[in-house]
Image (cartoon, rainbow, N blue to C red):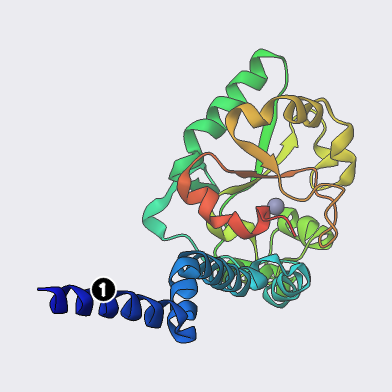
Amino acid sequence: MELNKDTDQFDIPLAKRTYLNNPYSTSLKKFLIFSPFLFLIFSFAALQFIRNVELIPLNNRKFQVERNHDARILGHLPYNETPKEKLVLIEPNIKVHMDMRDSLLEMREEAEKDGIYLVFLSGYRSINLQNDIFYSLKSIRNQEAAERARVSAPPGYSEHSTGFAIDIGDATQRETDFETDFENTDAFRWLIKNAAKFHFKLSFNKDNKYIDYEPWHWRYEGSIEALKVFESSNRKL
Ligand SMILES: [Zn+2]
């Protein structure tokens, strides 16, 4: 028994001493204690790296501006032609997208109640018609010719192809049709004050750096489809 006891007493402290004095074990212990912190630091660094890589193209304004410049022709953004089944006739010669018809007619009625007479000059235009307006003066009516002299969106680049754009005049001052002078009419003043209630917005205001000021040209943004169509135009550069 005594021998065993001595052996135990001898062995155990020796084993403990050996373990504690082993430099590798001490390092391992330290590593195990700090490993959760190291893991957190590396995870955080990795996350930051991934986020930076993903955000660089979105935050790089120069890149975005250059990309938008590429999409435009003569300052006009590209637009698809609205399918015919989505168009409705609101005047003998004027078709618009079905989403905006009710708002447009309602706006004209409300204006009349205030003694303002809006006249619709041009709505949907097919890419073919836009082609004629852009390239051929002979094939277009006087009204279109007058507009062409003021603004010539290339075919495929006109908001009118979407059916969500409408050119508006003042029925009591037709000489201002498609003229910058339209901004001095009661109709224009009424539109500036009230059009937003009917989800209409001036497309090319004085601040537009790409396209001339067009006080007569309004677009509808009151449906999801319309908002999608004008998403890039509304994107801040
Ligand atoms: Zn227009």
Hey, which quadrant is residue 41 in on the image? bottom right
Q: Is residue 80 above or below residue 208?
A: below
Quadrant housing residue 183? top right
Look at the picture and state if 94 lies above or below 127.
above
> Furthest-front residue in view?
2
Q: Residue at x 79, y 32 (%)?
A: 188
User: Who's the residue at 89% across and 32% down the image?
Assistant: 184
* Residue type (three-letter) at the residue carrying disc 1: Gln
Where is residue 62 shown, x and y percent of the image? 78, 72
Where 124 falls versus 47 (above or below)?
above
Residue at coordinates 26% horizontally, 80% vertically from top-left?
11
Residue that badge 1 annotates? 9
Looking at this view, is 235 or 39 the one in front? 39
Q: Nearer the viewer, residue 29 or 18?
A: 18
Please state the horizontal and vertical placement of residue 195, each as a whole percent of the image: 67, 30
Quadrant housing the N terminus:
bottom left
> 230 and 16: which one is in front?
16
Q: Quadrant of residue 120?
A: top right
Count of numbered tags: 1
Q: Residue furthest left?
A: 1
Q: Is mark 1 within 8 Å of ligand 1?
A: no
Q: Secondary structure at mark 1?
A: helix
Along the horizontal axis of the image, is 183 left or right of 113? right
Question: Callout 1: few (<14), some (14-19), or many (20+) C-alpha neighbours within 10 Å?
Answer: few
x, y percentage for residue 124? 56, 54
Determine the residue positioned at 67% across, 57% down. 233
